[in-house]
Image (spheres, helix red, strand yellow):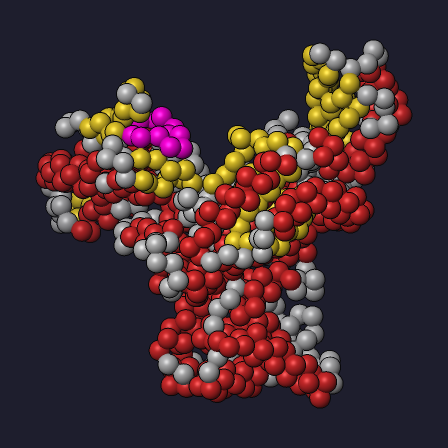
Amino acid sequence: MSEKINFELYDPNVEMKLISKEYRALLKGLKNRIDRTGKKNLRLAFEMAVEAHSKTRRKSGELYIFHPIAVARICVEEIGLGVTSAICGLLHDTVEDTEITIEDIERTFNKEVSGIVGGLTKISGIIDTQSSMQIENYKKLIITLADDVRVILIKIADRLHNMRTMESMKPDKQAKIASETLFLYAPLANRIGLHAIKTELEDLSLKYLEPKQYREIALKLKETKRQRTRYINEFIKPIEDTLSEKGFNFEIYGRPKSIFSIWNKIHNKGVPFEEVFDLLAIRIILDVPIEEEKQACWNVFSIITDSYVPSTERLRDWISKPKSNGYEALHITVMGPHGRFVEVQIRTKRMNDVAEKGMAAHYFYKGEKKDKDSNPIDEWLKRISTKLQNSEENSLDLVNDFKLELYNEEIYVFTPKGDLKMMPKGSTVLDFAYEIHTGLGNKCIGAKIKHKLVPLSHVIENGSQIEILTGAKQKPNEDWLNIVTTGKARTAIKTAFKAEIKELAKDGKEILTRKLNAISAKYNDKNLQTLIHFYKETNHLTFLSKVKLEKISLSELKKMEVLGGIIKTEKLRKEQENKPLTDSEIIKKVKEKLKENSDILIMGEDGSKIQYAYATCCNPIPGDDVFGFITINEGVKIHRLNCPNAVNLMSKYSYRIVKTKWNQSKEISFLTGFKINGIDDLGLVNKMTKIISEHHNINIKSISVESEDGIFEGIVKLYVMDIEQLDELILNLKKLDGVINIKRLEVEL
């Protein structure tokens, strides 16, 4: 839900005309998918939403009703959902923000609509980035996914519109919402098959997290558009001519990489924009009957490889076996004119609809596909539903396991009987054993692949046939959690641990009972809770199992007072008064101090009211966009907004994030560094040090340079006053002959 503010700004008559125009556009988007009853209910939902939000405005000043209408339009026009989802999109904020109740909605419409709106209301707190229950909110979202996928599709539409209209928000709010979007919503959209929305969410997130880089890439794409267009036309002409000659009904066009994917390549591989050679891809969309799709795509593949030399290592066949998000296509990379690699994507119209609109399009076409009983999306949803049946799953573990499933690509492997199984890329033999059956995983000792024995940790490859080997005495151990990569395997191993802990706890109970009898105390709930609290354990199972394993010494029982069979620990507590505070107590104290100032002023040598330190993972310097993170033992850690850990910290622990701004003395220097590479030249290091020390008067901590085959790579660590000084230095160093690239270090210095 977006931020809102109440005030009069626009002419009411003009606003009502605009609202009516938006509603007519929504109605037009449904076209032939709405009957008379549907129109009546849609109009009812529209009027209910207009009335409910009539006095509320968004941060931008516009009436709030424009937001739910926009969400409903995204559901209909960009995701391909029907009238029920449109109604729910219109009503998605009414229960949370107005006097309308779920019961009102059920009476006006039906249980289906009230159920979806109720699901949306339950997970609405997920965008409250100040909530200490953030992980619980993520868990709600995941559980809702298994209940009714339309809730998540509408929630993604809601997030997309919020991301499109964040200009009026404060920068820190923009950054937190953008981080959360990258953390969960973009990969979730991708997993459900909403590729176009996933791409836009990533680009919009980058726009607010890395505004400078976003603008630079966008500008360069704009500047090179004419050049790309000429190249695309040159590339597609021979293919287009042949396809027309052979009578195909088709579309063919080129598209640039998304800004986020270009930034990702620049950021991860350290290459400049000019060296990202796969900036574009060619897409061919065929209009053929469903029964002819596979043959038609391979025929077009043959035509392309007749015109250009293919790179066989980069062939991706997602027609024979679609991705788990339902994506189907043939991808082939070929060598195009002027020695440039070009990716060509071959799809049919149906495949393209599924790729762009994901699950909604899949279900629209599902009835027409007689040759397939199920779809990978259905299988994935079943896996999620099965996983959620384990009610003991820790919320944080559930979210982390779920995220792994969102990001992983798939490979295909075979059982000894030839059954095909889909596994996440990077899965191990142990993952595969648990995928077949939990009992098989618990007893797994290794596997045979191509008649060779391989260990549990062996990473399986695409197309492998795997025979799992078991041992009667084998059982899961803690190290297995470092071997497996899938959520299913991790959950099964943890469940096995819990069963073992229960057995250990039984023996621990007997030991504790004997020890308590020795000091004339009783084994009862009161004494047990006293001891759990005294030894700072979380529950009785953990405490008793540690007693059995002798990880907890009960020797201190003799020092405790016993009155009427009840243990008293006050004397021992007094002896421990000088011990360090607990984690929660430290966080509470720091947060109390933070309430005094809404912003932390990062001072120089004068110090600050609050203990702070600079994070070594990103080494912030004055001028960097930064935020504070409340740690357990080191006060507040200051991170750069583009720190590699920023997305994770903001998403998982947003309640520990604080606004931060610089008020830095120019007399203090900060350690930073950069990596520099290029063509080796005699005296280059001397020229570099001269510019750094003499021209900029910057102190150097260290310089290390390695050279091989005429190429050098160096790491420079130095002390600067602020980001402006560093940027100016890098700009001057780039002017040196032979220097190709300079990239700021983001590792511990």
| Left or right: 454 in relation to 162 | left
- Residue 313, given in percent of the width and then of the height, sits at 53, 30
Locate residue 107: give its quadrant.
Answer: bottom left
Visible in this render: residue 548?
A: yes
482 or 238, which is in the foreground? 238
716 or 571, which is in the foreground? 716
| Left or right: 205 in relation to 541 | right
Picture layout, residue 363 above or below residue 292: below
- Residue 322, given in percent of the width and then of the height, sits at 43, 47
Does the stretch in magenta take in 463?
A: yes
Q: Residue at x 56, y 64 (%)?
A: 78
Locate residue 642: give its quadrant.
Answer: top right
- Residue 233, given in percent of the width and then of the height, sits at 73, 46
Picture layout, residue 689 above or below residue 667: above
- Residue 746, given in percent of the width and then of the height, sits at 64, 33
In the rendered image, the quadrant that contains the N terminus is bottom right
Q: Residue at x 20, y 28 (%)?
A: 470
199 or 400, which is in the foreground? 199
In the rendered image, the quadrant that contains the C terminus is top right
Residue lying at the far right of the rendered structure? 695
| Left or right: 75 in relation to 228 | left
Picture layout, residue 132 above or below residue 122: above
557 or 264, which is in the foreground? 264
Count of numbered badges drawn on the protein: 0
Visible in this render: residue 603?
A: no
Magenta segment's dominant SS is loop
Q: Residue at x 52, y 64 (%)?
A: 79
Does the stretch in magenta take in 684?
A: no
Q: Residue at x 23, y 35 (%)?
A: 417
**What stretch of residues is rendered in magenta?**
455-466
